[in-house]
């Protein structure tokens, strides 16, 4: 008798679960295999002008760098979303008067690996076959200067040797909140397929920490490129 009751209870339990799943599937227009993801992957190719306010007599003209950015936008079908992205690019620097300034390849001391973590709020305006987006938010520029190939630590430098200059360059990057930026930008994405969008993107990255500590816009980035969302 107990076995019969257990079998009956189990049958009722699984029947209830099956009925609940059937109701959920009827309410949802998507099957598990076709339901859209709540986020989009973001890829950006955006050549940028790195503003150099120092004299070109002692440093390079404002160089063009080539950041590659990747991240996500979440949620992807909302008018307001967040879009954390990480960008990477490389530069050359030298030390002048205690400051890290862009350098031409023949005068470089460091090869600088640069990573920008950007966490903006995105506002989307949906059109019939495209969407226009604008965003703004804080960013952190993480820079790591490495002794450039062909340069020896014992080579002459501003502080005496290139090795000493490398240490001073890295200290300059992190002191005075020069790593703190604020970004603003916009993009116009066209629906290429139901899951793929692409279009032009523009962005400006303002060195808030540098404006406060140095009273100039050294390191401002102005970029134009292509944004792809999938």
Image (cartoon, rainbow, N blue to C red):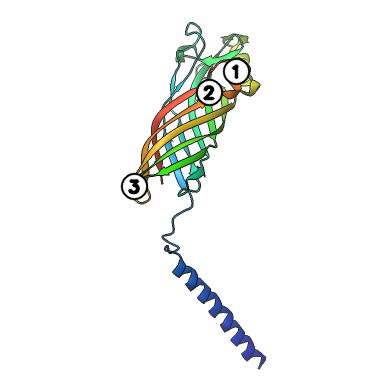
User: Is 213 left or right of 116, judged from the image as shown?
Assistant: right
Residue 44 vertical placement versus 47 (above, below): below
Q: Estimate how packed mark 3 is, as few (under 14), some (14 to 19) or many (20 or more) residues with alpha carbons within 10 Å.
A: few
Residue 227 vertical placement versus 177 (above, below): below
User: Pointers 1 and 3 in contact (CB under 8 A)?
Assistant: no
Mark 1, mark 3: which one is toward the viewer? 3
Q: Image quarter for residue 227?
A: top left
Q: Residue furthest right?
A: 2
Residue at (46% x, 32% y) in the render? 185
Q: Is residue 77 visible?
A: yes
Q: Residue 21: image x %, image y %?
A: 50, 71
Residue 118 vertical placement versus 163 (above, below): below
Q: Is tag 2's residue or tag 3's residue first in the polypeptide sequence?
A: 2
Q: Estimate how packed mark 1 is, as few (under 14), some (14 to 19) or many (20 or more) residues with alpha carbons within 10 Å.
A: many
Q: Residue 86: image x %, image y %?
A: 51, 36
Q: Element under label 2? A: strand
User: Pointers 2 and 3 in contact (CB under 8 A)?
Assistant: no
User: Pointers 1 and 2 in contact (CB under 8 A)?
Assistant: yes
Numbered circle sitting on residue 135: none
Q: Residue 172: image x %, image y %?
A: 62, 19
Placement of the N terminus among the 4 image quadrants? bottom right
Q: CA distance from mark 1 to mark 2?
A: 10 Å
Foreground of the two, 7 or 133? 133
Q: Which residue is mark 1?
A: 169
User: Is 33 left or right of 207, judged from the image as shown?
Assistant: left
Q: Element under label 3? A: loop
Q: CA distance from mark 1 to mark 3?
A: 50 Å
Q: Is tag 1's residue or tag 3's residue first in the polypeptide sequence?
A: 3
Q: Is tag 1's residue or tag 2's residue first in the polypeptide sequence?
A: 2
Q: Residue 23: image x %, image y %?
A: 49, 72
Q: Which residue is mark 2?
A: 112
Q: Which residue is mark 3?
A: 128
């Amino acid at each position: 008798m107990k076995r019969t009751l257990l079998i009956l209870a189990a049958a009722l339990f699984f029947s209830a679960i099956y009925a609940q799943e059937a109701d959920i599937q009827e309410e949802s227009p998507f099957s598990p295999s076709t339901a859209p993801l709540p986020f989009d992957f973001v890829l950006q190719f955006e050549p940028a002008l790195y503003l150099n306010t120092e004299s070109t007599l002692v440093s390079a003209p404002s160089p063009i760098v080539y950041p590659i950015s990747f991240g996500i936008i979440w949620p992807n079908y909302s008018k307001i979303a967040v879009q954390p992205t990480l960008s990477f690019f490389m530069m050359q620097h030298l030390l002048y008067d205690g400051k890290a300034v862009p350098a031409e390849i023949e005068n470089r001391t460091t090869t600088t690996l640069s990573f920008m973590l950007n966490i903006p709020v995105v506002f989307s305006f949906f059109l019939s076959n495209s969407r226009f987006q604008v965003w703004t938010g804080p960013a952190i520029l993480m820079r790591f200067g490495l002794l450039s190939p062909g340069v020896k630590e014992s080579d002459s430098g501003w502080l005496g040797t290139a090795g000493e200059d490398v240490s001073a360059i890295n200290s300059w990057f992190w002191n005075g909140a020069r790593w703190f930026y604020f970004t603003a930008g916009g993009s116009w994405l066209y629906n290429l397929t139901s899951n793929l969008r692409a279009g032009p993107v523009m962005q400006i990255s303002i060195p808030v920490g540098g404006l406060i500590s140095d009273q100039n816009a050294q390191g401002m980035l102005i970029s134009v490129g292509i944004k792809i969302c999938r």
